[in-house]
Amino acid sequence: MEKVGYRVEEDILGVVEIPINAYYGISTARAIQNFQISGLRFPRVLIKAFGLIKYAAAKVNMELGLLEGEKAEAIMKASMEVAEGRFDVHFPVDIFQTGSGTSTNMNANEVIANRAIEILGGKIGDKKLIHPNDHVNMCQSTNDVFPTAINVSVADSIINHLLPSLEILNNTLESKVREFEGIVKCGRTHLQDAVPITLGQEFSGYLSAIDHGIERIKKNIDELLELPIGGTAVGTGLNAHPDFGRLVVEELARLTGIPFKVAKNKFEALQLRDSCVSISGVLKTIAGSILRLCNDLRLLSSGPNTGLGEIEIPAVQAGSSIMPGKVNPVILESTMLACVKVIGNDLSITLANQLGELELNMGMPLIAYDLLQSIQILANSSRNLATRCINGITPDIEKCRYYAEVSPSLITVISPLVGYDAAAKIARKVVGEKKTVREALIEEGFTEREVDEILDLKRLTMGGILRKR
């Protein structure tokens, strides 16, 4: 007898009570019971990918004469509703589940089947009308659907979210390079005074790192466009029409505007997720570059009275619960934490790719979650960093120039004239006797005019050798 508010479904293991308003079925209900681990759920973009795949599969199966039109149309409508986000609440399965991702694939099959049944005027759970396996999952296996969903969602996220965010960061840095090109400051190596550099040159290094990161993504994304759909259980394509995989890939390309293609080798695509490890490595590299950028900006903006204070970053919120008036670099630190998470996720993805034996990887749910999380937080933090911090940076021009003028490393410029050892002695005099470089050079016999030429800070940022006259 059914409880009020529940329906009963049965499988080979017995019966399970399911909430009457749930679109998922018995397979998902068992997964909910079995995997109460983290409370973590897959992001919207992966559910969208499942919806698109099921839509494409139903359409292709109809065109191939394998699925009757009325059923196919209902499944296609339900699948598109899933892709649009109307049923996200009905995808409750924890990410820590069976390693192939079967529970999530069945979750999609059941939600789409029950919604299709509803569209056809039937009662949810009536598998005689639309069956989650026989109809929604026709010509498919979790083993080819889940890796296909990973690639579709990751490519979608990178192209439509991450790359635009990195371009915003790139453009913001490029603007600052131009703005700061004439501002001379002291360079620093090992956190010690070095020869002059412009603030624009310093920022150009950060810009180049992001620019290279964008190019690395574009070079590595091609592997992700290979989809293994049609390989079914082990890559052979058993129980799938020979044209099914190719046609589904073509339909997914049409739906997304992304040039997906059939995997060169479906056995490899099921055994390993090397394309995910590769792109994760690129994300890790970018995260490392941004982490370094943020750390440098924290240092350059340190103060206000006892730090370097060469730049000022926008104040966006109070920084201390005990020290009134204190403002901290919260946007920079938020970004740094996100970058650390991306770097950590890369190790998780690498290890998950090694799980499983022979024909199937069994780390797919973790790979999917961590990679999509890395893309999301790297995209969001990059955009936030650009718009809420870097865009509003202002330099303290006088302080930058002062530090450049008092750096003992200015002596470097006369090394070609007097030799390294003699220049080193003058540098030690500057430090030991608390003299300015100008004073030390005049004491060594250089004229005021020669010193003016030697200490032309702007010229020193342009490279080259000061030659004897």
Image (spheres, rainbow, N blue to C red):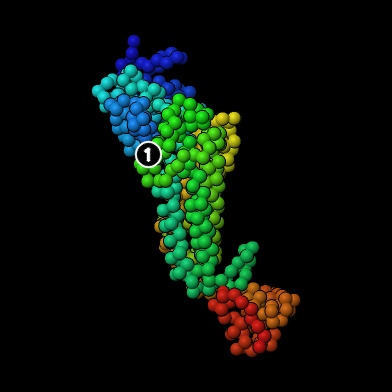
Q: In the picture, which quadrant includes the N terminus?
A: top left
Residue 138, given in percent of the width and then of the height, sits at 40, 26
Amino acid type at mark 1:
Glu
Q: Which of these two is toward me, 217 or 334?
A: 217
Kindly state the secondary structure of the residue where label 1 is placed. Answer: helix
Instruction: Identify the residue shown where x is 55% and y is 36%.
Output: 268
Residue at figure coordinates x 72%, y 76% from the top left: 420
The front one of 49 and 169 is 49
Q: How far across and down, in percent of the image, does residue 63 sit? A: 34, 31
Label 1, on which residue? 251
Say which of 344 and 64 sits in front.
64
Q: Residues within 10 Å of mark 1 (few under 14, many from 20)?
A: many
Taking the image as shown, residue 90 lies to the left or right of residue 217, namely: left
Residue 466 x/y as whole percent: 64, 81
Extreme residue in the top direction:
1
**Residue furthest left in the image:** 121
